[in-house]
Image (cartoon, rainbow, N blue to C red):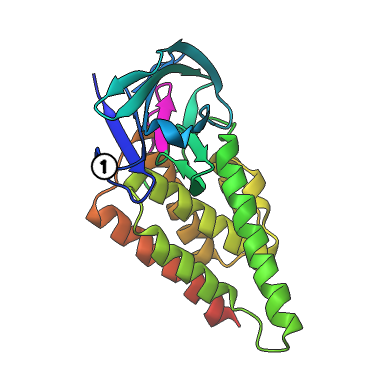
C-alpha cells in the first residue's frame, strides 16, 4: 500500500502543534485499477476558538463520497477531525484538491496541496517517433489548464497592445512557461509540456491540437502544411509526453533533455521559415 501524505498550516507548508489550524491529507494508493476507488483521508486540527468551516474535496471528473466522518476529539489543546472519502470515475489522470478550510480569524482560505491520482491501467506506448494511442477522452482538468493558458496568452496580448508597446512574443511566452514547468514533478511536467506546445501552435497557426487527443493530433499533423522538420519535432513531444502520462515510461534527465531539444527546434524552425 502506498501512502501519499500532504500537509499545510495556517502560516506555511509545515505542520506543528503551535499552529492554530493545520490540514493534512493523504491517499492510500496513488494509482488504482479500473472500477476501483481512491481512498482519501483528511485530518483537520484547530484551536476551538477558530471555528473553521471545512469544505469537501474537489476533483474534476470524479465522484466523491464521504465514507466516514469522525467526531471532533481533543489532541492536547487542539481539536481534531478526520474524514474518509472515496473517489471514483473513469480511467484517467486526475488532480484532487483534498480540502479547503476557512475561518473568520484567518485571512483567505487554507488548502491542502494538490494530489495527483490515476485510475485504470494505461496502455503500453510505442517508440518515441511512432504514434501512440492513449485513451480518446482526456481528463477535463487538462483541458481546463489549457484554456486557462490560452486565456492568459490572449489577455497578455490585449493588455500590451492597449499600452501601445511591443506585443508579447509568443515564443518568449512559451519559453517562460516551459522554464517554469521544470519545477514540477515528472507527470504534471509532461502534461504541462504537451499543453505548452499545443497552446503555442494554436496561437501561431490556429492548429486545433487543444481539442484533439494525441492520436488525432498526429493524424492532423500528417496532413498539415507545417514544415516537415517542425512536424517531426511536434510528434516527438506529443508522443514522449503521452508515454510518461499514460504508460509511465520515461521521466528521467535524458528524457526531459530530449524534450528541451525538440521544443527549441519547434520554435527555431519557424524562425528560419520567416
Res 97 visible: no
Nearer to me, 233 or 15:
15
Name the image quarter holding the C terminus.
bottom right
Q: Position of residue 185 (x, y in %)?
A: 33, 48
User: Residue sitting at 72 percent across and 85 percent down?
Assistant: 163
Q: Is residue 84 left or right of residue 6?
A: right
User: Residue sitting at 55 percent across and 42 percent down?
Assistant: 142
Res 165 visible: yes
Q: Position of residue 200 (x, y in %)?
A: 58, 64
User: Residue sitting at 46 percent across and 43 percent down?
Assistant: 110
Judged from this view, the residue extending furthest toward the right is: 162
Name the image quarter holding the N terminus.
top left
Q: Position of residue 106 (x, y in %)?
A: 48, 47
Picture quadrant of residue 26? top left
Nearer to me, 24 or 129:
24
- Give the residue at mark 1: 18
Q: Is residue 15 magenta?
A: no
Magenta-drawn segment: 115-126
Q: Is residue 9 left or right of residue 217?
A: left
> Where is 243 relative to 159, above or below?
above
Nearer to me, 138 or 208:
138
Q: Is residue 77 left or right of residue 263?
A: left
Q: Position of residue 157 (x, y in %)?
A: 68, 74
Dot 1 crowding, Cα within 10 Å, few <14, some 14–19, many 20+: few
> Where is 211 relative to 149, above or below?
above
Judged from this view, the residue extending furthest toward the bottom is: 165
> Where is 274 relative to 115, above or below?
below
Secondary structure type for disc 1: loop
Amino acid at each position: 500500500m502506498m501512502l501519499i501524505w500532504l500537509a499545510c498550516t495556517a502560516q506555511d507548508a509545515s505542520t506543528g502543534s503551535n499552529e492554530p489550524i493545520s490540514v493534512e491529507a493523504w491517499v492510500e494508493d496513488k494509482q488504482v485499477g479500473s472500477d476501483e476507488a481512491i481512498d482519501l483521508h483528511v485530518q483537520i486540527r484547530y484551536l476551538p476558538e477558530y471555528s473553521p468551516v471545512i469544505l469537501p474535496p474537489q476533483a474534476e471528473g470524479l465522484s466523491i463520497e464521504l465514507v466516514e466522518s469522525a467526531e471532533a476529539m481533543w489532541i492536547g489543546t487542539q481539536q481534531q477531525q478526520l474524514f474518509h472519502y472515496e473517489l471514483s470515475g473513469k480511467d484517467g489522470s486526475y488532480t484532487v484538491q483534498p480540502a479547503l478550510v476557512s475561518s473568520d480569524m484567518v485571512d483567505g482560505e487554507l488548502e491542502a496541496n494538490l494530489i495527483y491520482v490515476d485510475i485504470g491501467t494505461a496502455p503500453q506506448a510505442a517508440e518515441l517517433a511512432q504514434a501512440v494511442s492513449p485513451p480518446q477522452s482526456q481528463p477535463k482538468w487538462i483541458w481546463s489548464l489549457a484554456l486557462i493558458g490560452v486565456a492568459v496568452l490572449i489577455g497578455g496580448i490585449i493588455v500590451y497592445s492597449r499600452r501601445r508597446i511591443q506585443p508579447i512574443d509568443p515564443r518568449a511566452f512559451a519559453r517562460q512557461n516551459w522554464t517554469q514547468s521544470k519545477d514540477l514533478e515528472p507527470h504534471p511536467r509532461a502534461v504541462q509540456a504537451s499543453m505548452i506546445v499545443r497552446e503555442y501552435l494554436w496561437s501561431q497557426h490556429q492548429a486545433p491540437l487543444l481539442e484533439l487527443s494525441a492520436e488525432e493530433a498526429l493524424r492532423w499533423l500528417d496532413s498539415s502544411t507545417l514544415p516537415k522538420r517542425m512536424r517531426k519535432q511536434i510528434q516527438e513531444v506529443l508522443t514522449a509526453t503521452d508515454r510518461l502520462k499514460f504508460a509511465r515510461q520515461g521521466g528521467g534527465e535524458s528524457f526531459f533533455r530530449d524534450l528541451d531539444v525538440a521544443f527549441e527546434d519547434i520554435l527555431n524552425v519557424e524562425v528560419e521559415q520567416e
